[in-house]
Amino acid sequence: MTSPDPDGLLAEQLLRLTRRVHRIQKHHLEQRDVGITPAQSRLLRTLAHYGSPPRMADLAERLEVVPRAVTTLVDGLEAHGKVRRAPDPTNRRVIRIELTEDGHKSLRELHAARRSAAEEILAPLTDEQREVFGTLLDTLMDGVATRRC
């Protein structure tokens, strides 16, 4: 007789949770009619963390994707007026990506959608459980970051 695989069960629970979280976030985005995909949302949030407009290569590195994926995301966001391509003032061959005013507005909507999704996800937990959960998430994320370095 084989013994149960507790890590296998935990892995399955983790995968189910991440799929559920993704569906809830997507639902909240759709309710607010922001009109962008989760991947585009991630790019907008990443753009907002730069002090000055980054290059596409900078975004690809930060998002850990191939440059072509960033080009596709930027094309879609630019078509909807959320970002614009701007020439680098010191090197005309370099193109930088800037948030537009509509992009900033979308970021505010994204933040509100993510907040309401988090409230829905965390609703079953007590304050104490939320604190423990937050600590566990930090531990997991720190472990992932350490292994990638």
Image (tube, helix red, strand yellow):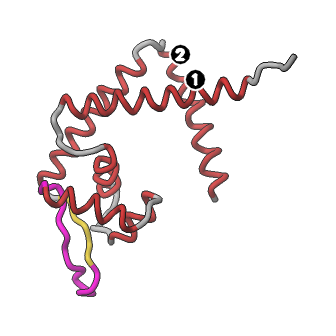
Q: Quadrant of residue 111?
A: top left
The chief SS type of the magenta part is loop
Q: Which residue is mark 2?
A: 128
Q: Residues within 10 Å of mark 2 (few under 14, many from 20)?
A: few
- Is 54 above or below relative to 46? below
Q: Residue at x 13, y 54 (%)?
A: 80
Q: Are marks 1 and 2 in contact (CB under 8 Å)?
A: yes
Question: From the viewer's perspective, is residue 76 above or below residue 135?
Answer: below
Q: Of the residues shown, which amino acid type is indicated by label 1? A: Val
Marks 1 and 2, Cα distance to the nearest angstrom?
6 Å
Secondary element type, mark 2: helix
Q: Residue at x 20, y 56 (%)?
A: 77
The image quadrant that residue 120 belongs to is top left
Q: Which residue is mark 1?
A: 132
Span colored in magenta: 80-94
Residue at figure coordinates x 60%, y 30% from the top left: 136
